[in-house]
Amino acid sequence: MRYQQVAAFFAASFSPLVSAVETARPTFTPPPTAAVSTGSVLQVIVSLLLVLAAVVMVAWVLKRINLPQQGAASALKVISGVAVGQRERVVLVEVNDTWLVVGVAPGQVNALHSMPKGSIPIQANAAGNPSNDFQSWLKKMMEKRNA
């Protein structure tokens, strides 16, 4: 019995010290898991590259199909064109009821001739080249202008 009283006395007197030591000692907490892992970074980069590739591909397709413009630009229509140099072209343009022969070079556009719409027939010849008539007409007009 005496033993139980001594144990109770020690327990009552040392319990505040034991609890203070337990709270003062830091408990081990594992480090937090990484919010960004190598796999997730790689997945984000691949996804971004796929989106950028899709944007470039759509822009390329739209450029290749060259849809006609709607609205005010529909009053202007390119009928035919001939390359006369590496970067120079002669183009037949329809504006309302007038055809314009225009010389196009890098940095400049010059009107060469104007005529009423339909004054030269545009049809496929035996070779299947519809621009050949325009070429012969242009050659005649240039010779006439130079003479």
Image (cartoon, rainbow, N blue to C red):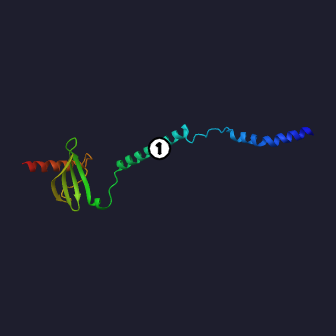
Q: Secondary structure at mark 1?
A: helix
Quadrant including the N terminus: top right
Task: Identify the image quadrant of residue 8.
Answer: top right
Q: Which of the 4 quarters of the picture holds residue 24?
A: top right
Q: What residue is at 74 percent from the left and 42 percent from the top?
A: 19
Residue at 35% x, 48% y: name it: 63
Percent from the top left, x then y, of residue 61?
A: 38, 47
User: In the rendered view, would you say 18 is above or below 66?
Assistant: above
Front residue (pair 147, 73): 73
| Total marks placed | 1
Q: Is residue 6 left or right of residue 56?
A: right
Q: Is residue 99 above or below residue 82?
A: below
Picture coordinates of residue 22 (x, y %)? 72, 40
* Amino acid beneath label 1: Leu
Residue name at image x 17 percent, y 48 percent:
136
State left or right for residue 143 relative to residue 6: left
Q: Residues within 10 Å of mark 1 (few under 14, many from 20)?
A: few
Q: Position of residue 64 (x, y in %)?
A: 35, 47
> Which residue extends farthest right?
1
Q: Which residue reaches farthest left?
A: 147
Query: Relative to 23, is 103 on the left or the right?
Result: left
Name the residue nearer the viewer: 81 or 73.
73
Which residue is nearer to you in this view: 103 or 8?
A: 8
Q: Which residue position holds label 1?
A: 48
Q: Residue at x 38, y 48 (%)?
A: 59
